[in-house]
Image (cartoon, rainbow, N blue to C red):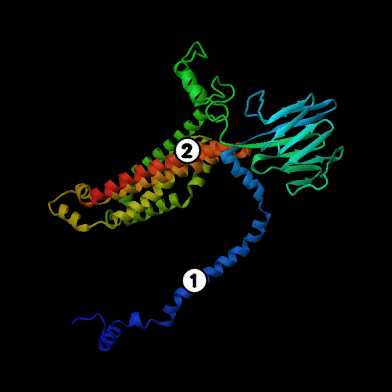
């Protein structure tokens, strides 16, 4: 009967034949624990060197939460200004049209208003002689004096005072800031306002059913064009979301990535044959070409983009040039390594029939490396779709420039979310296309 147990004699023989496995030196046995200890010490050093606790403590988390909320919601910001003869309602950058009349603001008198957040139990009443905040059904009269507002007696934790301004926090629904000159209301709602049609459009305020009815059987809003064409134009030229401009910039980004990668792949292909030592016998040419690849890829794509923006001005041309320069170096490097690792037996077989060097490379080398070359080029094309967004932010055109412009306003974070979502969709599509093509190429190369 056979057994899996090893006898003492066999075990001793195994240890004698492989002493380097069973009797490793102390230095080798301590290598892994020492590496872990050094890594931990380095992380601790970085933690205190970059003063991470102070960074966390000084971070403006409230502002970050507002920016994040702006990705999936929007704010209406009316101002109730105190005048000598009453209260005037004004709107700051209203997304509800020039003369909004939302149902959550009610005029309760000739010069008095109430702004509701979550029903009557959470609202604020504004009149010339008093401001009353209702929080959870409890009424708090906020004193407003010439030097500023003051906290009322028994004010809840949702009320705060800073610099003569009383802020009433109603959670996600918004807030009200009481000053000596006005009451500034920020009312938040889920969704993206005016995504399809802005207030100038004839379709503004319609639901999907009403839009369908207007397009199919409704009378023309513009006698010179059908409603479906007017609907498409109103959507593309939406003043708030600027869909046409966003799609145009997104297309620029895609073209930048494709053209830059294509030119780089076409140039790196012949240059890598010069750099490969087993292909070209010219050692000086090998060395010079490899150093050229190192130079091109050692300078980051963002630096190349800044350089070309200075030279050519803003636009997609600097972006294409930056991708072209960086990828020529990187693809040249990877292609050269692939060439230097080809199977020489295929080359010798073609050479044995008296073929010229060009024919030897065509039939003995290219079939081996072409799947790798194409696979790398496809990967960089997909990767450059993301990179083109970053270099666009420094003036190299594309949607990156549009993205950074929306960020600078600090008010258009829903537009930022929209463009980020479009970029994610494009990258997802190109990643799947690139992966499918690479799989077919690598599969066919193995047969």
As drawn, the label of residue 335 is none
Disc 2 element: helix
Residue of label 2: 422
Q: Position of residue 417 (x, y in %)?
A: 54, 40
Residue 436 in view in this figure: yes
Residue 77 is left or right of residue 385, and the answer is right
Query: Which of the image's four quarters has the N terminus?
Result: bottom left
* Residue at image location 37% in from the left, 47% down from the top: 379
Residue of label 1: 36
84 is higher (above) or lower (below) than 142? above
Nearest-to-viewer mark from 1 and 2: 2
Disc 1 element: helix
* Residue at image location 49% in from the left, 36% down from the top: 398
77 is higher (above) or lower (below) than 267? above
Q: Earlier in the sequence, mark 1 or mark 2?
A: 1
Residue at far top of view: 223
Residue 269 in view in this figure: no
* Residue at image location 32% in from the left, 83% down from the top: 19
Residue 342 is left or right of residue 108, and the answer is left
Q: Position of residue 331 (x, y in %)?
A: 37, 49
Residue 141 picture quarter: top right
* Residue at image location 50% in from the left, 22% down from the top: 210
Q: How many angstroms separate mark 1 from mark 2 (CA)?
A: 41 Å
Give the class, few, some or many, for how many residues have Cα within 10 Å of label 2's Cα (few <14, many ≥20).
some
């Amino acid at each position: 009967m056979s057994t899996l147990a090893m006898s003492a004699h066999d075990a001793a023989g195994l240890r004698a034949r492989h002493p380097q496995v069973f009797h490793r030196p102390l230095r080798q046995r301590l290598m892994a624990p020492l590496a872990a200890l050094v890594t931990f010490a380095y992380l601790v050093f970085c933690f205190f060197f970059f003063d991470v606790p102070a960074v966390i403590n000084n971070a403006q988390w409230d502002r970050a939460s507002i920016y994040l909320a702006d990705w999936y919601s929007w704010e209406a910001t009316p101002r109730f200004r105190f005048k000598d003869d009453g209260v005037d309602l004004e709107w700051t950058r209203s997304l509800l049209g020039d003369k909004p009349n939302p149902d959550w603001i009610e005029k309760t008198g000739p010069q008095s208003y109430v702004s509701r957040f979550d029903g009557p139990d959470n609202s604020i009443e504004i009149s010339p002689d008093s401001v009353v905040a209702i929080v959870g059904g409890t009424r708090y009269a906020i004193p407003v004096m010439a030097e500023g507002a003051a906290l009322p007696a028994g004010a809840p934790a949702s009320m705060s005072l800073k610099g003569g301004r009383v802020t009433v926090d109603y959670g996600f629904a918004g807030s009200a800031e009481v000053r000596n000159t006005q009451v500034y209301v920020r009312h938040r709602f889920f969704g993206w306002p005016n995504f399809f049609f802005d207030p100038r459009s004839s379709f503004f305020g319609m639901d999907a059913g009403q839009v369908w009815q207007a397009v199919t059987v409704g009378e023309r809003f513009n006698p010179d064009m059908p409603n479906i064409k007017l609907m498409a134009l109103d959507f593309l030229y939406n003043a708030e979301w600027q869909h046409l401009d966003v799609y145009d910039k997104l297309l620029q980004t895609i073209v930048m990535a494709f053209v830059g990668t294509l030119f780089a792949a076409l140039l790196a292909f012949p240059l890598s044959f010069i750099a490969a030592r087993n292909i070209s016998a010219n050692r000086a040419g090998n060395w010079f070409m490899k150093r050229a690849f190192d130079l091109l890829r050692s300078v980051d794509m963002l630096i190349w983009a800044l350089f070309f923006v200075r030279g050519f001005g803003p636009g997609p041309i600097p972006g294409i040039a930056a991708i072209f320069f960086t990828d020529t170096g990187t693809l040249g490097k990877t292609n050269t390594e692939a060439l230097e690792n080809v199977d020489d037996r295929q080359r010798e077989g073609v050479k044995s029939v008296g073929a010229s060097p060009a024919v030897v490379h065509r039939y003995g080398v290219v079939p081996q490396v072409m799947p790798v070359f194409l696979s790398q080029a496809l990967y960089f094309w997909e990767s450059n779709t993301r990179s083109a967004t970053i270099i666009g932010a420094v003036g190299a055109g594309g949607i990156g420039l549009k993205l950074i412009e929306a960020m600078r306003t600090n008010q258009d974070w829903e537009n930022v979310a929209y463009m980020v979502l479009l970029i994610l969709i494009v990258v997802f599509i190109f990643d799947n296309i690139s992966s499918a093509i690479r799989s077919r190429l690598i599969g066919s190369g193995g047969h």
